[in-house]
């Protein structure tokens, strides 16, 4: 599905993001960048997505929001390390989403879009069309694998 | 009738006052053709779209990108009548160009990303929501005359 070039591009982007974490501390990364912001973006643009979080405090910079965002980014980054093994890597998350969370898969697309927007804000010009295409393709594959056990 | 808050109106005017149509238009359209290659089906007579570099450097793509942004400006200047503004263009895209309206959303997502890349941190969640609401109204108006 993804070409070698695309896989390399994706791995490079995620490595770059995680390596910033090493400099300024993992928590700092996750509070200054990508995923908690993506989740916030998603809640702002697509209010329906908030319905899945009625049991949590998802106000700006809440602990729940940050920890949730962290879980998601770590899973996406982990998957990026070896995309050919996505089904294996995501097996436990597949079960969780299918039988417990049961999030409508349309929402995965909405979140992916917000991740791309966050990446664009963060990387500016470096978020080239090729990088965008590769990342969009990866996030689509990730979402598809995540929803595999739904039915 | 769409209800716009003061924040949304101000945000849209602000964004469009700060983007260069000759840069953002071509960037958005060429990005769309790269990220969603099936959209190239509508540009058969645009010449070389063989790879990303060819698309990004294609003068017909660039020109059309600018045309699109100028078209968007019509909605920016009259945010309370977007449906009417695009009635004719909607007919054109349906009857003459036969464009699947789903493509409008793809282009608008690419435009959002190009604008996000330019504005960086200033493209906050709230700014994004306002911008996407505006584009959603445009997209809906463009699809309205299809039957």
Image: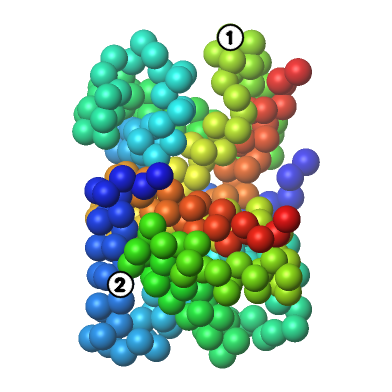
Q: Would you say B101 lies left or right of B144 here?
A: left
Whether residue A36 is situated above or below residue A139 in the rendered picture: below
Q: Quadrant of the N terminus of chain B?
A: top right
Crowding at label 2, few (<14), some or many (≥20) Cα neighbours within 10 Å? some
Q: Is residue B118 visible?
A: no
Secondary element under disc 1, as helix, strand or loop, is helix
Q: Position of residue A48 (x, y in %)?
A: 73, 62
Secondary element under disc 2, as helix, strand or loop, is helix
Residue B96: which disc? Answer: 1
Q: How many numbered marks are there? A: 2
Distance between the alpha carbons at the discs numbered 1 and 2: 46 Å
Residue A17: which disc? Answer: 2
Q: What is the chain letter for disc 1? A: B
Q: Position of residue A16 (x, y in %)?
A: 25, 70
Q: What is the chain letter for disc 2? A: A
Q: Position of residue A131 (x, y in %)?
A: 31, 51
């Amino acid at each position: 599905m993804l070409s070698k070039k695309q896989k390399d591009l994706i791995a490079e982007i995620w490595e770059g993001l995680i390596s910033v974490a090493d400099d300024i501390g993992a928590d700092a990364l996750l509070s200054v960048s990508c995923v908690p912001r993506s989740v916030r973006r998603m809640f702002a643009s697509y209010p329906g997505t908030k319905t899945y979080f009625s049991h949590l405090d998802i106000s700006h910079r809440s602990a729940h929001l940050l920890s949730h965002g962290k879980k998601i980014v770590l899973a996406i980054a982990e998957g990026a390390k070896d995309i050919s093994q996505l089904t294996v890597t995501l097996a436990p998350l597949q079960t969780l989403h299918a039988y417990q969370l049961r999030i409508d898969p349309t929402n995965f697309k909405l979140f992916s879009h917000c991740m791309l927007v966050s990446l664009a804000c963060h990387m500016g010009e470096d978020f080239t069309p090729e990088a965008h295409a590769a990342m969009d393709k990866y996030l689509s594959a990730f979402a598809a694998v995540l929803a595999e056990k739904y039915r | 009738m769409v209800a716009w808050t003061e924040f949304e109106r101000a945000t849209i005017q602000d964004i469009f006052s700060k983007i260069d149509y000759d840069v953002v238009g071509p960037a958005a359209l060429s990005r769309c053709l790269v990220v969603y290659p099936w959209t190239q089906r509508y540009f058969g007579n645009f010449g070389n779209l063989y790879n990303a570099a060819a698309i990004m450097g294609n003068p017909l793509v660039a020109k059309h990108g600018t045309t699109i942004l100028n078209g968007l400006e019509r909605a920016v200047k009259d945010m309370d009548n977007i449906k009417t503004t695009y009635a004719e263009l909607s007919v054109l895209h349906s009857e003459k160009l036969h464009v699947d309206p789903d493509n409008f959303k793809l282009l608008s997502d690419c435009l959002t990303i190009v604008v996000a890349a330019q504005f960086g941190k200033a493209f906050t969640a709230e700014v994004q929501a306002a911008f996407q609401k505006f584009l959603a109204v445009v997209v809906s108006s463009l699809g309205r005359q299809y039957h």
